[in-house]
Amino acid sequence: MTATPAVRRNTTPQPKPGDPSGAPAGLQQVAHYQIRETLGFGALGTVYLAWDTKLNRSVAVKVLADDVKDANLRQRFHLEARAIAALKHPNIVSVLDFSDQDAPLQFIALERLEGRSIFDFLCTYGPLPEQVALCVAREVAAALEYAHSQNVVHRDIKPDNVVLEGERVVIIDFGAMRLTDNHQWIPETDVDKAPMAVGTPGFMAPEQLVRTEVDHRADLFAVGALLFNACTGRRPYEATSTSAEEIHAEARRGRYRDPRDFQPLLTPGFCDLVGACLAVKPGDRPNSAAALREHIEALLRQHGITDVKPVLQQYVRAPSLDLAYDLRTIDTLTNELKLALVRDLQRAIRDQNAERVTQATRQLRRVEHYFAANDKSRSARAERPRYLINRPVRRLRWFVLGIAAALAVVTVLLFSRPAVFGHLHDALVRLAARWG
């Protein structure tokens, strides 16, 4: 099983070219690459940060461990180098150089990635927002679409092997790859023909765990597991131990928890996509990486996202789960709350837990009553006639106009008919004298 970690950001000051003071003990030079520091360890070797003395640039050098004497493993290491070198895609790490197959020290020189793996983001900031996870999966699906068109199956898609570098998503570590057809640029080998149980438990498709023939649909299963893990921090299949047999038994039964148990605000469309990818039978999964990419793009459009790059850039600048809900409306959150309560009620009924059924029913009725009353009030206000809505204003307006009209009439009579007011004044004086 391969577990080569992602190339991580270098937070230490860069040594000057030609200065090997930062190099790890025991290995100072690989070909024309000066070793600076250790970036990570894998099952077959170590990844170093190195300086290319020919082209004066930083590179990542993956070196096969000296204690690996198995000819098949050494052959697979060389096969990985040739495969990545032949895959030219912006979402696949680039190979700059690699050693001869009979060289005493086997190495692969890769482009230096300044980003961080999805695993690092999970460990540092917690689960990714749904939109960000879908954007990452969209780029991964695009890379797999190209790789599958070249008859290359990765077989080890997981958070450690997906690097987020600004707006770019990069797949690394093709050590578990498998060729599904003959190539002119990569000859078929005995290593490639042998059905090997390679990959990472929890992200491996059921057919990988029993060492049967696998095709491109194993990668689609891994994308579903990647989405599940990215948004919940959990793996879909988690046995009590790391035994591949126990995980395989769970996977064969299709017993994985609903991701909304860990992240209740995940949308139903997202969970349906994850469920389709995690289908036990390969035939029940999406037909191709292209179909998976189109499905993801449809979900992104529902979130109002047509270009994934700005979303990824925003997340890298300020990783936060709040980004997932910035664009959501109150109606969307209300519907998801109702769905979550309905699912809780269904689980309680299924478990025959009377107390939970009563509690869930009470909560659902309370929410339904509250939002129904608000909806009724809003609809009543919306349907109310205008003359009813403005009645107080209209009454005040007519009152003011009446007073103004009366004052105007009195003023006109005062100046045009002064005798009338004189007679009125005399009448009022006589009336007052009589009653006095």
Image: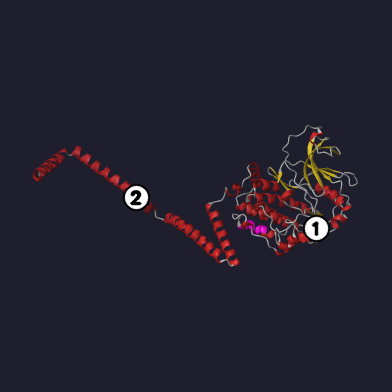
Element at label 1 = loop
Q: Which residue is mark 1?
A: 197
Q: Residue at x 58, y 64 (%)?
A: 348
Element at label 2 = helix
Q: Which residue is mark 2?
A: 392
Q: Range of the magenta residues?
A: 268-274
- Horizontal side of 332 relative to 52 (left or right) equals left
User: Residue 389, percent across and down?
Assistant: 38, 52
Q: Which mark is residue 102?
A: none
- Horizontal side of 398 relative to 125 (left or right) equals left
Q: Main secondary structure of the magenta part?
A: helix
User: Residue 25, percent across and down?
Assistant: 82, 38
Q: Amino acid at mark 2?
A: Pro
Q: Amino acid at mark 1?
A: Ala
State the quadrant of the N terminus: bottom right
Dot 2 surroundings within 10 Å: few (below 14), some, or many (20 or more)? Answer: few
Does 330 sit above or below residue 35?
below
Depth check: give the residue in front, 327 or 34.
34
Q: Residue at x 84, y 53 (%)?
A: 183
Does 262 sit above or below residue 424?
below
- Horizontal side of 119 relative to 41 (left or right) equals left
State the quadrant of the C terminus: top left
Using the rendered image of the protein, determine whether residue 6 is visible from the camera's viewpoint.
yes
